[in-house]
Amino acid sequence: MIRVKKVPVILLVFTFLIPLTSFAAGQSEPEKLDQLIKKINEKQSKNIKNFEKKVEAYFFDTHTPEVIKGLIKEFPPGEIVAILVVSNLSKWPVKNIVDMRKKEIDWRNIAGQVGIKLKKMIKEVKDFRLAVG
């Protein structure tokens, strides 16, 4: 009787969980980061004032409200988060990161230039997204 119940459970695991884990593993780091940035843009663009408050609260110890206000005038929410994360991880000034983005340098190359791992950047952007919604 117990063996009969195990078969459907095992079948469900193979049917649903294995494809999900292989899909997640199939994305490259730049694709994961782009997807996170896109999700932040979609959710946070609806209320920029609220987003501004969330960013100021989250990055209060590393970036001034003036820096954040300046970024909001130039970039979508996901890009702002990525810029602030890179600045925090690398200790590079926000202005330098902004200059690289304006030159259309991709995040992988920016991470390499400032000496951080893209994987760490993804984790920090994901942490922001989970913390503020």
Image (spheres, helix red, strand yellow):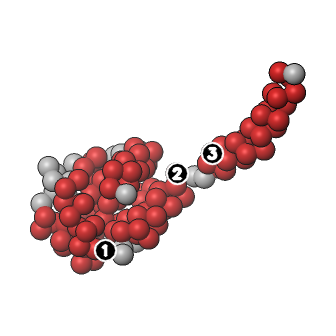
Query: Spatial distance from mark 3 to mark 1, Cα to Cα?
Result: 33 Å
Q: Quadrant of residue 93?
A: bottom left
Q: Tell which tag, 3 or 1, sits nearer the viewer.
A: 1
Element on which disc 3 rests: helix
| Earlier residue among tags 3 and 1 | 3
User: At 25% across and 68% down in the image, what residue appears?
Assistant: 50
**Front one among 9 and 115:** 9
Instruction: Quadrant for the C terminus, please.
Output: bottom left
Above or below — where is 45 with respect to 114? below
Instruction: Using the rendered image of the protein, determine whether residue 99 is visible from the camera's viewpoint.
Output: yes
User: Badge 2: few (under 14), some or many (20 or more) residues near its Cα, within 10 Å?
Assistant: some
Instruction: Quadrant for the N terminus, please.
Output: top right
Which x, y percent locates residue 29? 52, 51
Which x, y percent locates residue 58? 23, 53
Q: Tell which tag, 2 or 1, sits nearer the viewer.
A: 1
Q: Is residue 96 left or right of residue 133?
A: left
Q: Amino acid at mark 3?
A: Ala
Give the residue at the far bottom of this rendering.
Answer: 73
User: Badge 1: few (under 14), some or many (20 or more) residues near its Cα, within 10 Å?
Assistant: few
Above or below — where is 115 with respect to 65? above
- The residue wearing badge 2 is 29
Q: Tell which tag, 3 or 2, sits nearer the viewer.
A: 3
User: At 12% across and 60% down in the image, what residue appears?
Assistant: 64
- The residue wearing badge 1 is 47
Q: Quadrant of residue 132?
A: bottom left
